[in-house]
């Protein structure tokens, strides 16, 4: 069965053209997998932008694909974030991106859609998924216009009210809303002097954020009042709520966009049901404290994309897909936990005020601040990879090398076996995986501190194996890790067939751009 709009059968259908769905399409196409994105809306988002920032780890994964510069050129760098409105300095984080990049979600989507088009991903707008049925060989997707299409896998990236999640009967447990936040992108005749103005008052809290030369985002938080989620927000309602809380509405007028949300925090009880998977808001929703939602979704996509591609290409068993939920569900659970904590800290009673003062004092301790900052920005993400080495599961730092940087070597979306110390036997040990991993022999640049002879870096930039010594047992562990994450080794005959009868090169020295910035 082919898609009657593109004339081809996609290998993966993605429901939703938000940041998560678009990033997943880019990752799949990079791996040579055909991806079709279905989007209910007829046109790209240009005004509505719930999210407004990219954190360090998201910028790192974009850098791993050679995309970071596009986003940096379109956004504004801000040196800090916040924890429930308490300032959180990011400037000394161990990353090339120790800042929040202010960039509206509509612009993030535009840039990702641009990249998806470059890779050959198809995006069908004005196309709504209404049903699906899966079997041993694939998924049949029903569309609102009565047509059907067939794919190997379906991924729901269709938001907090996910149709895919509902139809798959995947549970979405969590905590209900306890408050209402209203927001509007508006013009103000009497704005506050500061670009970021946040205060707690007797009847709630409010924020005024300068988004451009003549427009602002205003946000009100009313506690113990839950607005019906389908009840529209008008300018009059937002103005009255702002006057009630702040004593003024700052001359609000000419809205671009008005909306509201609560602090419900829910997570899918599983991320996979056979050939159907969930990512982004379809898998987890929470109060947008700290700007973590969009970032978590993009990182979901980067974790899932290479795994799904390896399974579709027949290189890895389907069990590899189970590691997606095993790795990403705990990350989202932690986001739900810290956003619940931040929502509680926004309340306006005397007990909460005392708690905020204590929390502000604690954030003044460097270790506390850096821990919270690492959590909000996700640079402390560590996946549960078997082994005792402290590097395992962590993001690979973007070391400066003799030629280029580590992240330069991940642009193709392949695994990276990085030999920094001339580990004997590495080439032979990895010979069965040259179609999936690049072996690069190089050295760190002067001043780079990295205490490992060799590392295996997964396509998502996380360390899967590390050698600190020259013990040959390290090579046995390497082969086990390659099998776990990339699938069984090719035999010599299969490698010859894959290369047209010629044995492929077992290693390659990839030369990228020169160093940029300091070693993280």
Image (spheres, helix red, strand yellow):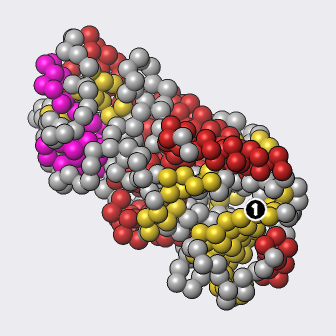
Quarter of the figure with the C terminus = top left
Q: Is residue 355 left or right of residue 1?
A: right
- Lateral position of residue 239 relative to residue 131, left or right: right
Is residue 288 magenta-colored?
no
Residue found 77% across the figure and 41% down from its top: 174
68, above or below 381, in the image: below
Residue pointed to by mark 1: 200
Of the pair 474 and 270, the residue shown nearer to us? 474
Task: Give percent across and percent down for residue 310.
Answer: 40, 37
> Which of the 4 quarters of the picture holds residue 499?
top left
Query: In screen coordinates, is 123 left or right of 435?
Result: right
Q: Position of residue 133 (x, y in %)?
A: 66, 45
Q: Main secondary structure of the magenta part?
A: loop
Q: Position of residue 186 (x, y in %)?
A: 66, 81
Q: 211 or 323: which is nearer to us?
A: 211
Residue 498, visible in the rendered structure = no
497 over 129 or under it: above or below: above
Q: Magenta residues, as a range?
A: 398-426
Please name whichever residue, 225 or 257, is drawn nearer the observer in this view of the structure: 225
Q: Nearer the viewer, residue 414 or 409?
A: 409
Q: Is residue 424 magenta?
A: yes
Q: Is residue 223 visible?
A: yes
């Amino acid at each position: 069965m082919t898609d009657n709009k593109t004339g081809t059968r996609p290998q993966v259908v993605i429901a939703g053209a938000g940041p998560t769905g678009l990033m997943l399409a880019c990752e799949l196409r990079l791996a040579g997998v055909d991806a079709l994105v279905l989007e209910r809306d007829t046109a790209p988002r240009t005004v509505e932008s719930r999210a407004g920032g990219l954190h360090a780890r998201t910028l790192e994964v974009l850098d791993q694909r050679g995309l970071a510069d596009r986003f940096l050129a379109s956004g504004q760098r801000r040196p800090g974030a916040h924890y429930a409105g308490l300032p959180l300095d990011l400037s000394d984080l161990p990353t090339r991106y120790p800042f929040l990049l202010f960039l509206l979600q509509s612009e993030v989507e535009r840039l990702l859609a641009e990249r998806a088009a470059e890779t050959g991903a198809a995006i069908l707008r004005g196309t709504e998924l209404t049903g699906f049925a899966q079997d041993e060989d694939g998924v049949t997707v029903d569309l609102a216009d009565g047509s059907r299409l067939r794919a190997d896998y379906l991924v729901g990236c269709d938001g907090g009210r996910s149709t895919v999640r509902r139809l798959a009967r995947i549970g979405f447990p969590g905590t209900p809303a306890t408050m209402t936040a209203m927001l509007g992108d508006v013009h103000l005749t009497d704005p506050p002097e500061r670009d970021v103005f946040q205060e707690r008052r007797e009847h709630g809290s409010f924020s005024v954020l300068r988004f451009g030369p003549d427009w602002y985002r205003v946000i009100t938080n009313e506690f113990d009042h839950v607005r019906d989620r389908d009840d529209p927000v008008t300018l009059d309602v937002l103005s009255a709520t702002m006057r009630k809380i702040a004593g003024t509405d700052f001359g609000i007028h000419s809205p671009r966009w008005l909306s509201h949300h609560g602090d419900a925090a829910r997570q899918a009880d599983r991320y996979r049901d056979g050939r159907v998977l969930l990512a982004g808001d379809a898998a987890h929703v929470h109060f947008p404290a700290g700007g973590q939602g969009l970032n978590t979704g993009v990182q979901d996509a980067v974790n899932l994309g290479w795994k799904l591609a390896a399974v579709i290409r027949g290189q890895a068993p389907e069990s590899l897909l189970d590691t997606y939920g095993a790795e990403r569900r705990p990350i989202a659970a932690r986001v739900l936990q810290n956003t619940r904590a931040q929502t509680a800290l926004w309340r306006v009673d005397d007990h909460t005020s005392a708690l905020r003062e204590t929390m502000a004092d604690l954030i003044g301790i460097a270790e506390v601040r850096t821990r919270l900052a690492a959590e909000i920005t996700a640079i402390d993400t560590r996946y549960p990879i078997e082994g005792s080495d402290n590097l395992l599961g962590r993001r690979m730092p973007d070391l400066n090398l003799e030629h280029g940087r580590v992240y330069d070597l991940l642009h193709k979306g392949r695994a990276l076996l990085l030999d920094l110390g001339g580990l004997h036997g590495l080439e032979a040990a990895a010979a069965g995986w040259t179609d999936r991993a690049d072996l690069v022999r190089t050295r760190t640049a002067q001043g780079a501190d990295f205490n490992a002879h060799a590392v295996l870096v997964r396509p998502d930039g996380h360390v899967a194996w590390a050698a600190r010594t020259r013990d040959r047992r390290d090579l046995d562990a390497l082969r086990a890790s390659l099998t776990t994450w990339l699938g069984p080794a090719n035999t010599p005959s299969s490698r010859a067939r894959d290369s047209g009868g010629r044995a492929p090169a077992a290693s390659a020295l990839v030369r990228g751009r020169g160093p940029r910035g300091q070693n993280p």
